Each structure stands twice: as C-alpha cells, then as structure tokens.
Image: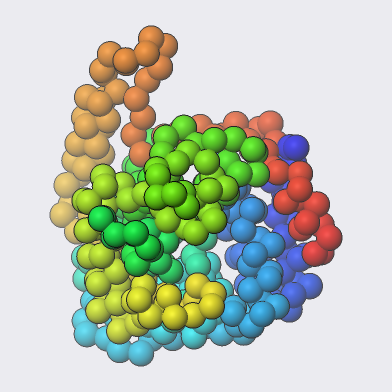
C-alpha cells in the first residue's frame, strides 16, 4: 500500500509519544524512521518500528537515557549511550563528530552501550549535509560464521562512507553480509527468494530462501573470506576505541543490545580547494557512468544515486509500505 510521508511521520510521532518519549525525541525518531522508509529502506525504517516498541516494553531501550561523554583527548572522544535509543545516540554522536571535524579538521567519537541505529546511512547523510565526509561503523550480535566455520561468531557490522556532493551526496551504506538481515526479512514478507545466495541453511548449504537463512541467522560474508576478515577488524576497532562490548560479549545477551560504534568525520573545507573536490567527484562519477552496460538499456550508479531517485519518486507518488506492518503500527498506536 502507498501512504504519504507526512502521514507516516505523524503516525510514528504519536506512537512514540504514547510510549512516553518527550516531544523532541519522538519527533527525531519519527523523522529518521520515515526518511529511511521514503528512501526505500523499509527494512531499517518502518518495518523495524514494531520490534523497537517491543524492545522498549522489555526495557532493552531506555527512553529516558542520553549519550554522555566519558573521555576525550583533543579531537577523539569516547561516549556512553547508556542503553538509550540507538537513533538518538547516533544523531548525538554524528553531531559531535561533525563539530570536532569543523574545529580540528577531523573528529572521532566512539560510542559504547547503545542500541541498533537502524539505517546507518541516515547519519552519513546528516554529516554530508553539514559538509563533512564520514566513516561510520557498528558491531552487532553474531550473525555470520567466520569463513570456514559452521556457527555464527562474527557480526555483519554495517559500514557507512558518505561524501558531500552538491548534486546529491555519495552514500555507501552496507552490511558486511551479502544482505542485511532486515533486507532478508523484506524478501520473506514478500514471499520471494533472494536474487543471490544470502547465507546457509540447516544442511550447511548456501541458500536463497530467506526463511531458511533467518532460522539460524548464518549470513554469507561479502567477498567470502575477505568479508569475514573485515567484520572481525571492524568489531575490534569499535570495541577498542569505545571500550565497549565486542560481538562476543553481545552474544552473551538474550537480545542484541549494548553494542559499540565509531563515528569519524572529516571536514574537507580545511584545504580551501575552491571546489576541487566537487570536480574530482564528478570526474569519477562521469567515468563510471560512461560504460557500456552488459544489458542494453541499463546503467551503472554511484552509491546513493538510486536511493535519491527512490526518495524523489516516493515523495511525489506516496511511500510503499507493507500493509501488515502498517496495520501493526496502527494497532500499537
């Protein structure tokens, strides 16, 4: 079904108010969940709202908690999320890393004891809107086997790189698994198979069946052994820099919580290049666009290009929402 973005945001705002968030926090949560959905990332937008509410009810998410700085050294800071809402903590740390970047040229904020940030690209876009390049990543509960292993011991640790661009930001937002688990669940909701293998089934065979993959959450690392190694390194960095929980320690909890994240922002304007970066980005994009497609009529895209197209289309025509999810949200409201 299609719903206007304004209606989604208003409904979510009222839902968060009902669950005792103060107005400012409810508005921020509704905005981020709605924007992700408008951008076509329902898997980390509106589809996650019922689970988010469930975590509030279970006390996993503390609606009154705020992230606090616990240590600093120049342009490097360590923060504690106090198990507050992941979106709100992520906004706080993105804003702080951006402020540090504008003061020092580069800023790094490491965050511990937070909850799921939903779509990591939201914070890359936020940093880019402020004129900053950003490199962001988070660890997760174990949901991939290390390469050659049978059981999940590493996380799919979402990784974001965003680069400001006047004609549309470049935003890479990817899990270190072939598919984010929210995306796999999207295919499950639609009753569709994955286009490519996304993980292992109970017979230790690679599968395209979302239900079989979700049963034990054994995702396929991107690049096979390379993705496995990258996952471990990101987990190490997030854990060391934040002095927080590793994927191993997160695995000891019943529910994924108390995760660790890193927010790095760079302010390119310190070089006073007079638009050079924009020219160089255009050159790279033009070169990659100007290639003969394998399939006639298709084209190549830079990271974030199709998201921008989806955003424009859905703002005009209405936002595509799973009817079952929407009815669940209405019942919670």
Residue depicted at 68% across the width and 69% down the height: 53
Label tally? 0
Q: Quadrant of the C terminus?
A: bottom right
Residue 332's x, y, as percent? 80, 64
Relative to the observer, which residue lies in front, 194 or 167? 194
Q: Residue at x 26, y 55 (%)?
A: 147
Is residue 234 toward the left or the right of residue 298 in the image? left
Location of residue 20 by image quarter: bottom right
For the point 41% across and 39% down, which residue is it?
A: 197
x then y, percent, for residue 271: 16, 54
Residue placed furthest toward the bottom: 70
Tell me where residue 51 appears, x and y as whole percent: 65, 64
Q: Which of the colour schemes (rainbow, by chain, secondary structure, one colour) is used?
A: rainbow
Evaluate whether residue 257 shows in this view: yes
Quarter of the N terminus within the rendering: top right
Q: Is residue 75 above or below residue 37?
A: below
Residue shown at 22%/32% (left/top)? 284
Question: From this viewpoint, which residue is outermost toward the top?
Answer: 296
Res 174 visible: no
Residue 47 point in image, percent of width and height? 64, 53
User: Image quarter for residue 154?
Assistant: bottom left
Looking at this rendering, what residue extends furthest in the front direction? 203
Task: Say whether residue 296 is left or right of residue 188.
Answer: left
């Amino acid at each position: 079904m299609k719903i206007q973005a304004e209606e989604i945001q208003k409904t979510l705002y009222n839902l968060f108010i009902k669950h005792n968030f103060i107005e400012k926090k409810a508005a921020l949560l509704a905005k981020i969940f709605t924007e992700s959905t408008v951008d076509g990332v329902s898997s980390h937008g509106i589809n996650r709202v019922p689970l988010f509410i469930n975590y509030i009810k279970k006390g996993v998410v503390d609606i009154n908690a705020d992230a606090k700085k616990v240590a600093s050294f120049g342009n490097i800071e360590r923060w504690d999320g106090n198990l507050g809402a992941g979106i709100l903590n992520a906004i706080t740390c993105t804003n702080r890393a951006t402020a540090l970047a504008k003061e020092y040229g580069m800023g790094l904020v490491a965050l511990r004891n937070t909850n799921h940030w939903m779509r990591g690209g939201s914070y890359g876009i936020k940093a880019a809107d402020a004129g900053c390049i950003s490199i962001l990543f988070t660890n997760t509960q174990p949901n991939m086997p290390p390469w050659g292993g049978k059981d999940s011991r590493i996380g799919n640790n979402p990784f974001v790189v965003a680069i400001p661009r006047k004609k549309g930001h470049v935003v890479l937002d990817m899990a270190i698994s072939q598919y984010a688990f929210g995306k796999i669940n999207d295919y499950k909701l639609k009753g569709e198979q994955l286009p490519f293998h996304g993980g292992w089934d109970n017979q230790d065979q690679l599968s395209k069946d979302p239900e079989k993959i979700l049963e034990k959450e054994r995702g396929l690392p991107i690049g096979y052994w390379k993705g496995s190694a990258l996952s471990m390194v990101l987990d190490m960095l997030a854990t060391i820099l934040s002095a927080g929980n590793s994927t191993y320690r997160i695995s000891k909890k019943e529910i994924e919580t108390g995760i660790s994240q890193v927010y790095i922002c760079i302010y390119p304007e310190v070089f006073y290049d007079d638009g050079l970066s924009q020219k160089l980005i255009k050159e790279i994009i033009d070169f990659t666009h100007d290639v003969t497609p394998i399939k006639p009529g298709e084209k190549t895209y830079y990271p974030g290009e199709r998201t921008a197209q989806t955003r424009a289309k859905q703002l005009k025509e209405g936002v595509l929402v799973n009817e079952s999810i929407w009815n669940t949200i209405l019942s919670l409201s």
